[in-house]
Every structure is written in structure tokens, then in C-alpha cells.
Image: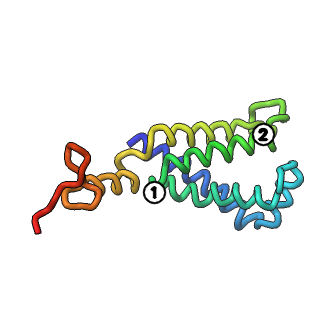
Amino acid sequence: MLLLLARVGLGVVLTAHGCQKFFEWGMAGTTESFGQMGAPLPGLSAWIAAIIEFFGGILLIAGAFTSVVGILVALNMLGAWLIAHVSAGTIFVAKGGPELVIALGCGGLLLAAAGAGQWSVDALLARRQRAPGTAGAAGATGAATPTAA
């Protein structure tokens, strides 16, 4: 239950920030903002951040590809810290500090390590793969179990 809550909480915040980039500021405004912050290749960086935040947030809420998304989120937040917050001189987000990107990045790392939990698309797919009579089912030796014709 805790992993579900962590995934949904992190996913909602990320999706909201992705929506902000795509729909509130628009990609032109997001690109301009990234350029003003000194992001390398601001157009590409803006798209990468928006995609990771929007779609990554949705995938985390569903619990799909959680470990991969968690790593991408952590890397995205590391980039945000290095580009936008490292010189802030404070931890507090209200003064331009990195507290939010640190929390989001650590949340991504936690989910990458722990996985999605039992109430997730990842767990559902793993259960289906292990179920008898499916293509992914294997016996104790790891070999596929033969079926009667």
C-alpha cells in the first residue's frame, strides 16, 4: 500500500509539472525558460523534461515500467538541480532552491529500487507471466513446461 501511495503522489506531482510545460507555458515558453536558465540545447532539454514529467508521471500512477521511469525521473531532477538550482544558495524552493527536485529525484530512486508494489501494472504483468499455461511459465528448472497436445 505504501508503494502505491508513493507512486501516485510522485506521479501526480510529475504529471502536473509536465502539464504545466506542455499546456500552461507551451513548449515555446518552456524552451525559452530553459534557454534563460542556461540549459544545453534548450529546445531538446525542454521536450525531454516535459515528456519524462508528463508521461513518466502517468506511468508511475499506473505502476508501469516503474524502475525505468524512476531512474529517468531521478536523472531529470539531477539535471534540473544542476541547471536551475545549484547556485541558489538555499535549499528552499520559495527562494529558488532545490528542495522539490531533490525530493522528486529521491522518490524516483526509491521507486526504481523498490519497484511498483503489488497494486501495479508491473505486478499484474509479472503474475500473468508466471501463471500456468502462459508463454512465460517455466518449471523449477527454468525450462518451459510441456503441455499435452
Relative placement, left or right, of 26 versus 137 is right
Instruction: Pick whichever, 3 or 41, lies toward us.
Output: 41
x and y, in percent, of residue 89 in the image:
84, 30
Determine the residue positioned at 45% across, 38% down.
114
x and y, in percent, of residue 3 in the image:
43, 42
Residue 77, compared with residue 25, is above or below; it is above
Q: Residues within 10 Å of mark 1 (few under 14, many from 20)?
A: some
Residue designated by label 1: 62
Q: Quadrant of the C terminus?
A: bottom left
Residue 14, compared with residue 114, is above or below; it is below
Label 1 residue SS: helix
Q: Residues within 10 Å of mark 2 (few under 14, many from 20)?
A: few
Total residue callouts: 2
x and y, in percent, of residue 138 in the image:
24, 51
Q: Quadrant of the N terminus?
A: top left
Determine the residue positioned at 77% across, 66% down.
27
Mark nearer the N terminus (1 vs 2):
1
Q: Nearer the viewer, mark 1 or mark 2?
A: 2
x and y, in percent, of residue 81 in the image:
75, 40
Residue 82 tag number:
2
Identify which amino acid the numbered label 1 is placed on: Ala
Can you tell which quarter of the image residue 19 is in? bottom right
Can you tell which quarter of the image residue 105 is in? top right
Relative placement, left or right, of 90 versus 19 is right
Identify which amino acid the numbered label 2 is placed on: Leu
Determine the residue positioned at 52% across, 37% down.
110
Q: What is the distance, in whole Å, between disc 1 and disc 2 at their CAs?
A: 29 Å
Instruction: Pick whichever, 52 or 134, lies toward us.
Output: 134
Can you tell which quarter of the image residue 109 is in? top right
Q: How is the image coloured?
A: rainbow
Label 2 residue SS: helix
Determine the residue positioned at 14% across, 62% down.
147
